[in-house]
Image: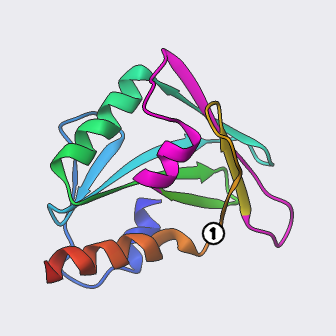
């Protein structure tokens, strides 16, 4: 995931590990990325989010302009959720353990649901890393 981000990044982009936890990264001191991996080969991919994971994401969101959650779906692709999209599938009422599930049929977008979702979010694999670069551009302009 980070290799794909770095390969397509303009020169001079900085990526460092967040102090909030081992799955969070800070890009150019402005944008956060929280990464979860599933080694499962085929759909569906389920990602568990403990209250500790959600606290780490919340901490990134209070410190940075924008935060993204990257869900690595085996070798199939990457779901890139904005913090707002993430909160649509897992609301602010944090429980000890919650889940986000991504499913995808061949040549279709990912369908993302969660233990708190009321609707399905559609996300294209191509949105990663485009969403992050757009956020970095907005942060530089501000």
Residue at 86% over, 61% down: 105
135 above or below 99?
Answer: below
Query: Is 30 left or right of 95, judged from the image as shown?
Result: left
Specify the farthest residue to the front.
118
Q: Position of residue 112 (x, y in %)?
A: 68, 50
- Among all residues in the image, which is located at the extreme top? 96
Task: Work out whether 12 lies above or below 52.
Answer: below
Work out whether 138 lies above or below 104: below
Where does label 1 land, which residue?
125
Percent across and percent down for residue 54 are 39, 31
Q: Position of residue 74 (x, y in %)?
A: 67, 50
Residue at point 42%, 65% (across, down):
3
Is there any visible trace of residue 17 in the rendered image?
A: yes
Q: Secondary structure at mark 1?
A: loop
Residue 105 is covered by the magenta coloring: yes
At horizontal 30% and vertical 37% (from top left) the residue drawn is 58
Q: Please state the extent of the stretch shown in magenta in the rendering.
A: 82-109
Taking 42 as reference, is 96 left or right?
Answer: left
């Amino acid at each position: 995931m980070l290799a794909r981000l770095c390969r397509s990044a303009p020169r001079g982009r900085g990526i460092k590990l967040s102090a909030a936890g081992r799955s969070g990264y800070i890009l150019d001191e402005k944008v956060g990325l929280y990464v979860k991996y599933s080694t499962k080969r085929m759909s569906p991919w389920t990602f568990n989010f403990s209250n500790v994971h959600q606290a780490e994401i919340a901490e990134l969101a209070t410190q940075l302009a924008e935060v993204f959650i990257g869900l690595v779906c085996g070798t199939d692709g990457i779901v890139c959720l904005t913090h707002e999209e993430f909160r649509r599938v897992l609301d602010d009422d944090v429980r000890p353990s919650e889940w986000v599930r991504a499913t995808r049929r061949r040549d279709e977008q990912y369908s993302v649901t969660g233990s708190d979702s009321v609707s399905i979010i559609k996300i294209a694999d191509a949105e990663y890393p485009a969403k992050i670069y757009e956020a970095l551009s907005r942060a530089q302009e501000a």
